[in-house]
Each structure stands twice: as C-alpha cells, then as structure tokens.
Image (spheres, grey):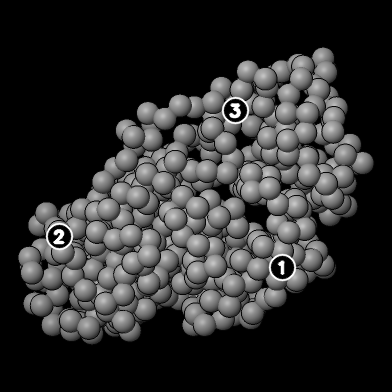
Amino acid sequence: MNDNTPIIVGAAQVLNRARTADDSLEPLAMMVRASRLAEEDTGAIGLLEKLQSVRVIRGMWSYANPAGYLAEQFGAVGAQTLGTLFGGNQNQAVLNRTAASILAGEMDLVLITGAENGNSATKARKVGRTIELTETPGEYDVVVGSQKPEHHDYEIEKGIRTAIQAYPMYENAIRHHRGETLEAHMQRVSALWSRFSEVAAENPNAWIRERVSAHDIATPSAVNRRISFPYTKLMNANMSVDMGAALIMSSVGRAKQLGIHRSKWVFPWAGAEGKDHFSASVRDNFYTSPGIRFVGGRVLELAGLTPDDLDHVDLYSCFPSAVQVAAAELGLSETRPLTVTGGLTFGGGPINNYVMHAIARIVELLRERPEARALVTANGGNLYKHAHGVYSGEPPAAPFRVDDLQKSIDALPSRVCLPEYRGEARVESYTVMFGAEGADIAHIACRTPAGERVWVNTQDGDVMQAMTEEEFCGRDVKIDVEGRIAFGG
C-alpha cells in the first residue's frame, strides 16, 4: 500500500443538550472538545500538536479564524489554517480536498472540525441573553468554497428567500410527476421519514432518539405545526441543536509512525463534486437533479461500485424532497436505509456541519464491518452544490481520486425565467406558507406556453385552503394585467 494513501484515523461527535441558557457552550468550545475526543479515538496521545493543517467548516457564528485558535490551543505551531464559505457540501468537499493533498504528499496529518449551538442560542435569546464568543482574530491561510445568493432575483422579488420555501416546491412537483394523490403521497413520505427516525433511535449521537410514527409526522399538532405545504415541522431540518464533530486524517505512513492501530483506519475511496444550475428558476424541472446524477454516477464509477454494492448510504436529508430526488438519481430504492444518522430532522441539523456527523457515523460502522462500502452525499444551497464520497474499512483498488463534473453539468440546457408575465400558463409547482394564524401566502411556479417559467403569489384564503386539499400542479391558469392568478380545472 502506498504510504501516502489517505485515511481517517480519528472521529468524534459532541452533543450539548442544554436545558437552559446557563448550560450553553459556544461552537468553538464544542470544536475543542470534539477534536480532543477525536485525538483520543486515534489512540495516539499528543497527536494534535503535530497537526499540519486545521480546517474549520463555516457556521452561523462570527469567528474570524477559529482554525488559528484551535491550532494555538493544541500547540500545533505553524499549522496551516483553512476555512470554508457557507454550504452543506463543504464537509465532503474539504475531505475530498484533504484526501487528495495527503495522496500528493503535501501533508500527512490534518484536523477537520465544526460545530453549531442553535439550541442554546435559541434558549438564550428567549431570556434576552447572548452567548459570548471567544475572539479569534486574524485570517485563514486558505479559504475554499464559492458563495453567491441562494435564490434567483425573480424568486427574491416574490419573497422566496429560504429553503423552507424551495424544498416543498420540489416535493409537490415530485408528487405530481409520480401521479400520486395528496393522501398517498403524504403516506409514502411520512413513512420514509418515520424510517429515518428509526435509524436515529439506534444512533448514539442522534439529537432525537425517539421513534416517531408516520401518522405523527404527517399530522399537524401543537408540537408539529404546519410550516410549508406539504411539510410539517417534523419534515424540516432540525437546526435547534448543539452539535460538534471532528475528523482526523493522515497518510498510512504517518499512521504507522504514530502507532495508530489498523482497526482504526477508514479509507476514502473516491470523491466527486459539481453544482446544478444556480436556482430552481432556471432548472428544467423541480423533481430531478442532473448534478446529483452526474456526481453520484461518477463517484461510484471511480470506486468501481454499483448502487447495489453499497452497504451504507447517507443521503443529504434537509427535507424529504432532497432524499427522494437523490435516491431516484442514484438508482437507490426508497425502501432501503438511506441514512446512517437519522437525517437532519432526527439525527440533527447543525447547519453546514451535518455531513461531518454522517461521516463520523460511517467511520463507526465501517470499523465494525471493514469490508462494507459506504456512500455519503452532501448538498449546499437549494439542491445546488453537490459533493459525494465513497468509503470503506478496506483499502481501495486504485488510489483516491476526486473529479469535478461541472463542465458536464453546465453543458445542460437551462430554462428562461421571466420577471413578469401576462396570459395563459400552467402550474408547475407551488407551496403554501403558514404562520401563527394559518396560511400566509402561496408561491406558485408557472410554465408559459413557450416553456418559460414565471413566479406568482396569491394570498386568497380560499385558494390557499384548496391547495392543501386538491392537486394544483398541472392546472391551467391565467395571469391578468395586475399579476393576479385565476385557476382553471
């Protein structure tokens, strides 16, 4: 085996179940704790002071250079500091980058970490307090990632600015594309999410470890309010968590020098990355993802595997639509386990850092059964930025490789989105947004006879109610001179 072969040798997760604001931990404290636990996991005490690079995944916090602070705390003098821009894809993307650097001999001992404290921060806000953050002055040596608005200008003009507005649009389009009734669709999707809760119940580091029935997931209640049709709260990513994680990567040669036992090694086999067209406004439809299809197909090809060869799968699971689209594109049955954590609802959704928890769980599972093969998918933005990785407890047949599929994805046609339109059209998808008093507004994506896309809103109470009880996708509409929408059959 090439001594530069990249491996994961340490993994740890931290959950701070703060009952009150007094129990809070800032994200940096969780990163320190997770990193020391990951060092302990390797069995090589004193490893952290030998780090050549400290890499931190960007969170909702305002630290300037947390990687520099960590390197100083651990005595890793001269260690490179690396940070990322925003995106749930960054964990896998940074791991891919790190594996490639280790294989190239550029470094041989790296820490990757991240954390969020959404739970205790929320508790603090409710009592008028803020959680103080440690000052981490300076700048990263390297910043990776790309950053641009997550929504098209024409979406923003209609008030569409968040994931909770975009993903239910995909969900309703999936239902219509599959020809399901509203009732049958809800039964299928809530059953899928209930199976995720069952996985979380067996995951020692899941935030919610109680099994939740499909009925309870689908049924609005005082603790499971409607968010955006067809989603209840229990179909949304749970960001109210205090969670941190850390991974330690090395070369095989360095692991041998440090005396890290072979049973600790987990091998990244391959990685692939690529971005879909920028927003839903210009994609061909709301129920497919060419980016996932190209990236997922390539990473399996590089690993020499088929979907049936995978023993463990963790599909990025901010909302059920993301899982369904990915499963369809990758050729995975929805009835097989599609998460190893319980997903962002039950496993916990610490913003950009979820995938590090998924990889840490994969490490645990592959140590139990080294011959198994695992796929992890990461998603940033609204089904936009994709990074995938394949792992095993056994070494790969070929050296690690990561491919960028962007040219292939960019070559695909895009759809024209109009700022305004008057005339006949057809509903492509929609969602109804709910507030404390009930339905607030419906966002509707329409297709013109020429195939262009246009966004329309309505706040008609009767229409919004009907949208939650009848299929509106595929309906013919007319948009009048004032931009109001009237529905046909």
- Say which residue label 3 marks: 153
Looking at the rendered image, the disc whose residue lies closer to the viewer, 1 or 2, is: 2
The numbered mark at residue 398 is 2
Tell me the distance, in whole angstroms, between the alpha carbons under discs 3 and 2.
44 Å
| For marks 1 and 2 on the same chain, the one whose residue lies earlier in the sequence | 1
Q: Depth check: 264 or 1 in front? A: 1
- For label 3, the crowd category at 10 Å Cα-Cα, with few meaning under 14, some 14 to 19 and many 20 or more, is some
- Residue found 83% across the figure and 46% down from its top: 470
Looking at the rendered image, the disc whose residue lies closer to the viewer, 3 or 1, is: 1
Res. 386 visible in picture:
yes
- Disc 3 and disc 2 in contact, CB within 8 angstroms: no
- Residue lying farthest to the front in this orientation: 179
Q: Amino acid at mark 3?
A: Asp
* Quarter placement of the N terminus: bottom left
Tell me the distance, in whole angstroms, between the alpha carbons under discs 3 and 1.
33 Å
Judged from the image, the secondary structure of the residue bearing numbered disc 3 is helix
Q: Amino acid at mark 1?
A: Ile
- Say which residue label 1 marks: 217
